[in-house]
Amino acid sequence: MATKFLLTLLLFHLSTTAYSIGINYGTLGDNLPPPSQVANFLKTQTIIDSVKIFDMNPDIIRAFANSGISLTITLPNGDIPTLTNPRAARRWIQQNIKPFYPATLIRYICVGTEVLHWGDDAQKSNLVAAMRTLNNALRVEGFKGIKVSTPHSLGIMLTSEPPSQGRFRPEVTPILIQMLRFLRESNSPLMVNPYPYFGWSPENENYALFRQSRMDPITKLTYTSMFDGLLDAVYSAAKVLGFPDVNILVGETGWPSACEFPVCSMQHAADYNGNLVKHVESGKGTPLMPNRRFETYIFSMFNENQKPGPLAEKNWGLFFPNLAPVYNAGIMRNQQGGGGSIPNPTPAKPVPTTPPGKVWCIAKPGATNQALQANLDYACSQPGVDCKPIQPNGPCFSTDIRSQASYAMNAYFQKNGRNNLSCDFSQTGLVTGTNPSHGECTFAG
């Protein structure tokens, strides 16, 4: 009887809660805090009310029990063909949902990740069948408050500009028709991962960062951001297929704060994510979907130092591993909104761990030339960092990349709080009390 009452209360909570800003919680780092600490931090220090994880990690699921934060879990792409079997689907629910629900507010099950982009033929062809079978298994087991969906990259789009002419790729359209029909029947959302970052160019930078407007030449509607344009393109594509009523959920979106190119900076990341939060929270919706508050999951929680790929992959996080904000994205409690509210965003200062007195930041002896070049490019692209002294004919100019990078890293370090975090540079920086100045070359300190 008590269990039935608790489930009734939970269903009421899920039906009345206005979910808005969530976050993707990845774990590809060797220096991340334990899940219980993450759950408590999000609950007590941020406005985040929902979390999405990329697996079914029981430690994380358990950590969010009784937190009031909803959780989205993800099953691997490789499990999709097996889960078309009703018996296998019920077994999966019994093993991965039943031990934790309703103490942990599991809200969605993601059947794979970007399957229509990265999956093999068997995964793609069985995707909708697996979604239906899992949904049926949830109902049989009595878990009516959990929805089933799957996130899509915008690689499913044939065209996204102008937004009113958005169309799906013909090769995935038959699967999407089946999927949209299921989502409508089950009242589940279409999950998409719009990243204006990947559409960046110098010409459309302001549009990507919520700073500039554009007009759709067909509808004459005005768009104040690429984010809205991408969502309306998906809406238009679904509408053409006869499914304008299926809700859209943003499974991932974000902007990296560092990479090898000018597109990445703390300012750009703060502007994008800060303006995104304000826009989503406003409930204005988009030109084609007005007055909607889209459930949106920012990518991502942490800078993850073990993610493979280019430097950007390690720098999507809103937080450092010690839970200090990388910049102001407007999600901390009792904090002014982000989106340009801080003209020169800096890492928040943790408890000081740098030596007393004057200190400098230099390149670690073992750092590779490739890493040092990336550090040099990044530091010199940041507001307030003066790299003129290391230009040709400058007092600190050198053909030695280590010397050049150390000067730039130190200039960044001195401008950004003079703590160990601002000298981290993906663990290639070193704080020292020895002045690296030499000859006519003076390192700030």
Image: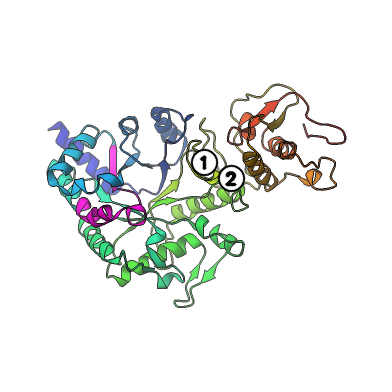
Whether the magenta-drawn stretch holds residue 107 is answered as yes
> Residue at (39%, 32%) from the top-left corner?
39
* The one of 37 and 67 positioned closer to us in this rendering: 37
**Left or right of residue 400, residue 172 in this image:** left
Which colouring convention does the figure follow? Answer: rainbow
Q: Position of residue 361 (x, y in %)?
A: 70, 31
Count neighbours of disc 2 (C-alpha within 10 A) and say few if under 14, some if 14 to 19, many if 20 or more: many
* The one of 187 and 354 positioned closer to us in this rendering: 354
Q: Residue flagged by tag 1: what amino acid is it? A: Lys
Q: Position of residue 111 (x, y in %)?
A: 28, 48
Quadrant where the image shows the N terminus: top left
Give the residue pinned by disc 2: 258
Between discs 2 and 1, the one toward the N terminus = 2
> Residue at (15%, 36%) from the top-left corner?
4
> Residue at (63%, 52%) from the top-left corner?
262
Query: Start and end of the magenta stretch?
Result: 105-131
Q: Picture quarter containing residue 168?
A: bottom left
C-beta proximity under 8 Å, tags 2 and 1: yes
